[in-house]
Amino acid sequence: MANFISRRQFTIEWGHCDPSGIVFNSRFFEFFDWGTWTLFEAALGVKPADLGATFGIVGIPLVDASARFLAPARFGDVVELTSHVKEFRRSSFEVEHQLKVQGVLAVEGRELRVWATHDAATHSGIKSQPIPDAVIARFEVR
Amino acid sequence: MANFISRRQFTIEWGHCDPSGIVFNSRFFEFFDWGTWTLFEAALGVKPADLGATFGIVGIPLVDASARFLAPARFGDVVELTSHVKEFRRSSFEVEHQLKVQGVLAVEGRELRVWATHDAATHSGIKSQPIPDAVIARFEVR
Amino acid sequence: MANFISRRQFTIEWGHCDPSGIVFNSRFFEFFDWGTWTLFEAALGVKPADLGATFGIVGIPLVDASARFLAPARFGDVVELTSHVKEFRRSSFEVEHQLKVQGVLAVEGRELRVWATHDAATHSGIKSQPIPDAVIARFEVR
Amino acid sequence: MANFISRRQFTIEWGHCDPSGIVFNSRFFEFFDWGTWTLFEAALGVKPADLGATFGIVGIPLVDASARFLAPARFGDVVELTSHVKEFRRSSFEVEHQLKVQGVLAVEGRELRVWATHDAATHSGIKSQPIPDAVIARFEVR
């Protein structure tokens, strides 16, 4: 049993890059966010904007994110971003992202997200909730 | 009678700049947005996040924006942004922004915004509404 | 004789949108920049990153930009951006952009850019230069 | 002996926030970058844009970044970002960032950066280089 993987190709834009001519670091975290939505839409067959209403959640907020920058990505580079859920826990999950430039791994990312519902009693206004088995099953590839 | 002017100083950051070493154009429109909120808070004495609740509006959405780029702003430059309402119309208003680098005008901006309430019947979900005289009066400096 | 038009489709991302749930205004100016590079690559057959070296210029810096926001674009919307050069002048040109959501015009943009070379004698370090006829000819569709 | 700590206060802007009304995650990595430059300027007394020329480096590129999101930051929140170098290694260093909202820790960040010079022989065009003792000494508070 393997993990469902989504792929997305896009071009590095001028506005993504900083004065050293390479992608500014925060942009990769934007790309990871793109990757997670793409992954969820592909695995669940639900449009990102409908995810909350479909599953009775407020969203899948991020609680932890990290990236390793191994090689630069530059203006005009066509990059491939692959994303998969590395692990589902009870009410959270870890997404792994790999961004390749011409087949070479340039950036690795990791996001820890929670399956969240409203909760007026908490400071953040949300609380985590068990991820339905039916959701998890859609990320398994037999 | 003159217009109320707000001033804001900040530093151009690395991540604001593109590979040519100057601020990427879209960032100035972010700065203008900062300027408008700063202006409204200063003139009305209401925190931006409370503007809607205070005046019974959903916000002051932008319908038109423009900028003239006269001189570059670079990483580390300390810039001054001045903003004022050039004209109040019935339900819209025009904000003018000037961004100076070491006293020299670098970018001029203009935003046309509306005083907006919810309206489920429209495509955008909002409609414009007359700006209260008491609001307009706060932007006048005698 | 018509103008060469480039088209580009993409999805509105979560990170493009602001608390009102629609694309934050400055993002459209990023999109316009994408559109101009896409247009130039399509018309000239030169990768954006090679444009400077190919034509002996430092780039095509923006001197003026504007946008009209006619309808909202929201998270998950698949949008189409079309871009064309409305007019070539001696050393500058005007690009027009249209962004449509489900076939409906949502945002119109305009960029005035210059064909620029290095010039150490100027404050900005660049100066405009006549656009080669051969470049202009590539944007004409018979 | 303690570490030199820099402090920076700023306001969360409308354009920093996403449709859930809180700061979009990638923005915090922008803020961390601000924090590192602020820290280096304060500790070394050298303007960020002059850092390279002063020390014969190309910069302090990021090789690893992470963040923990503990509590939300919202439009209008005045936040305080504190930054310090947790550890200097031979040619790299780790910066720790804490972002507080009304005195409560909201986000913790970590950046691993290298002290880098040009090296045409490498894929990235740069290589790490030992950090001068005189630089490290400026980050120590007796």
Image (cartoon, coloured by chain):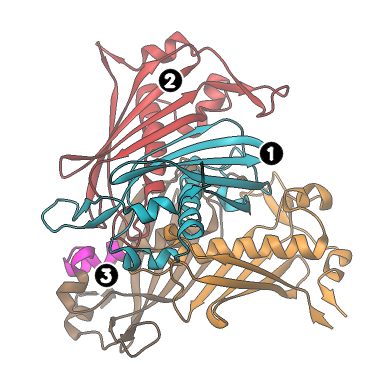
Chain colours: A red, B orange, C brown, D cyan
Tell me where residue C126 appears, x and y as whole percent.
33, 83
Q: Position of residue C70 (x, y in %)?
A: 56, 60
Three-letter amino acid code at the position of disc 3: Phe
Task: Name the side, left or right, on which B41 lies relative to A48.
Answer: right
Crowding at mark 3 (Cα within 10 Å: few <14, some 14-19, many 20+): some
Where does the magenta region start and end?
C37-50
Q: Residue at x 32, y 41 (%)?
A: D89
In the rendered image, which residue does mark 1 sit on?
A: D103
* Residue C4: assigned label: 3
Q: CA distance from mark 2 to mark 1?
A: 29 Å
Q: Are marks 2 and 3 on the same chain?
A: no
Specify the subunit that label 1 lies on: D
* Above/below status of A46 relative to B105: above
Question: Three-letter amino acid code at disc 2?
Answer: Phe
Q: Nearer the viewer, residue A19 or B141?
A: A19
Classified by dominant secondary structure, the portion drawn in magenta counts as helix
Report crowding for label 2: few under 14, some 14 to 19, many 20 or more residues within 10 A (C-alpha). Answer: many
Q: Which mark is residue A93?
A: 2
Of A74 and D43, the residue lying toward us: D43
Taking A69 as reference, is D40 above or below it?
below
Q: Position of residue C81 (x, y in %)?
A: 38, 57
Residue closest to the far left: D121
Cα distance in 3D space between marks 2 and 3: 47 Å
The reply to whether discs 1 and 3 touch (Cβ–Cβ < 8 Å) is no
- The residue sitting at 61% across, 49% down in the picture is B123
Q: Does the magenta run of residues contain C43? A: yes
Indicate left or right for B18 with D123 as reference. right
- Residue at position x 82%, y 53% from top? B55
Is residue C44 toward the left or the right of residue D25 in the image? left
Report whether residue C69 is seen. no
Q: Is residue A116 in view from this perspective?
A: yes
Residue A53 located within the stretch drawn in magenta: no
